[in-house]
Image: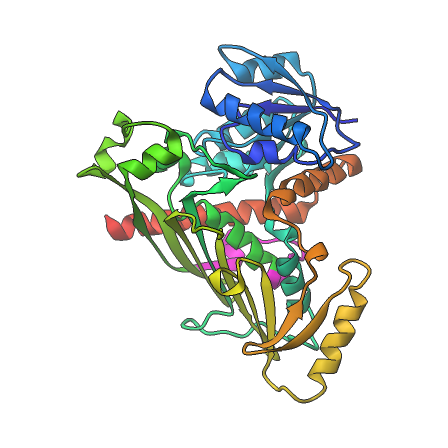
Amino acid sequence: MHTLLFLEPGHFHAALTLRVANPRIDPAIHLYARPGQERDAFLALVRSFNARDDRPTDWKVRIHESADPERALVEERRGSIVILAGRTRPKLGAIARLHAAGLHVLADKPWLTDGAALPDLEQVTASWPLAMDIMTSRHETVARLTQRIAADPEMFGELHGRANEPAIDIQSKHHLLKMVNGALLRRPSWYYDTRIQGDGLVDIQSHMVDQAQWFLGDGAGFEFERDFELDDARRWETPVPRDLFRASTGLDEFPESLEPQVDAGVLHLACNGEIRYRLRGVPVRQRAEWGQREPDGGGDVHRTTVRGEHANLTARNGPETGFRGELHVAPRDPGAGFEARLSERLATWEAEMPGLAHRPSPLGHEIIIPDATHTPHEAHFAMVLDDFLDLLDVGAWPAALAARIRARYTVLARARERCSRARG
């Protein structure tokens, strides 16, 4: 049975790894964190999992207070797995120190804010113990189906795109003020400091690079110098009025550290970004935006288009879908037995994803996904933790995974450098 250690959980993703009970994890977990809002938020979310009526958990949180939580965690060594989620800028340095101390680390994305951290990235991906980032999108049902069809040579063929119409086009819009687990999300003030959290080229973008790698085919992994060619990178701002900042953080005023980005009571947050590159020659565009407030009854907005030799795929989630994930397949040649082949493929996935079907849609054919087959985003963090435990139980770090992690954070660091040079 594994014992989990949580170090300074500054982001709610840390607690979401505990959303469901896991028979491979000791219910007694250890929290190393200084007193304050971030620790309180972690404890409150874990308590909500324990107190719910439907399949409550039974986590017993042991709190260890220290002036230096990381040092205490390493010295006391009450377990071998550390969960990290919080400030981005110091994250990779902490991962490297924990890795050097012989501890396994599961850390939320992103791992860096700029290229200065790349030497630590090389260190933590070079050898055992395991260090893995939390990439939830591979557990999302629509994304899994998109990848399955894109990997089918008969139905989809080779990826097919041009610079102005990329073969892989991934776009999303998140919101600064949002609901999580039925409650308003309270963000720490440092979340609005791009020097700590990172800007629009390094956060959500990490998920998007991972998806592009997945759709192309992970194979033996990726190397930045061999497989990536950057075409363009840009970032822009979302205005954050004082009332929005107050509602999000609980603070009445912007802290002094953010004043250089404040003008006339509005914080100008450089949280949006677009990166264009070629991955093994395949053109990719990824665009991540942040809105101010989540719409009533709404949530995050996603749209992914994957263009192939025989068909185009459109995955979308937004107002037009009632904020429910959809996948549409548009064959380039509607004849030639396409519908029969699609039905055949869906039938082969019945055991894993029961109830799949398809129907005509304005975008080709919509894959009908039963509600029971959909999994909410908040459930994916515990699934990633399960993946992590699988790798630990095997006792070996797949070389392709290490290469994939190195490549995706390197492309983000290089995109940020390119954008900074262009702006400078």
Comparing 108 with 42, the one in front is 42
Which x, y percent locates residue 45? Answer: 58, 29
110 up-or-down from 310: above or below: above
Queried whether the magenta region covers residue 35, the answer comes back as: no
Residue 223 point in image, percent of width and height? 55, 52
Q: Is residue 325 left or right of residue 67?
A: right
What residue range appears in magenta? 215-229
Compared to residue 23, the image places residue 405 above or below, namely: below
User: Can residue 325 be seen from the camera position used here?
Assistant: yes
Q: Quadrant of residue 261?
A: top left
Q: Residue furthest left?
A: 264
Residue 402 vertical placement versus 38 (above, below): below
Image point (63%, 52%), residue name? 138
Which quarter of the picture shows residue 6?
top right
The single residue placed furthest to the bottom in the displayed view is: 335
Q: Residue at x 44, y 61 (%)?
A: 277
Residue 122 position, x and y percent, is: 54, 38
* Residue 233 spot, x, y in % from top left: 36, 56
- For image coordinates 49% across by 16% down, the residue present is 34
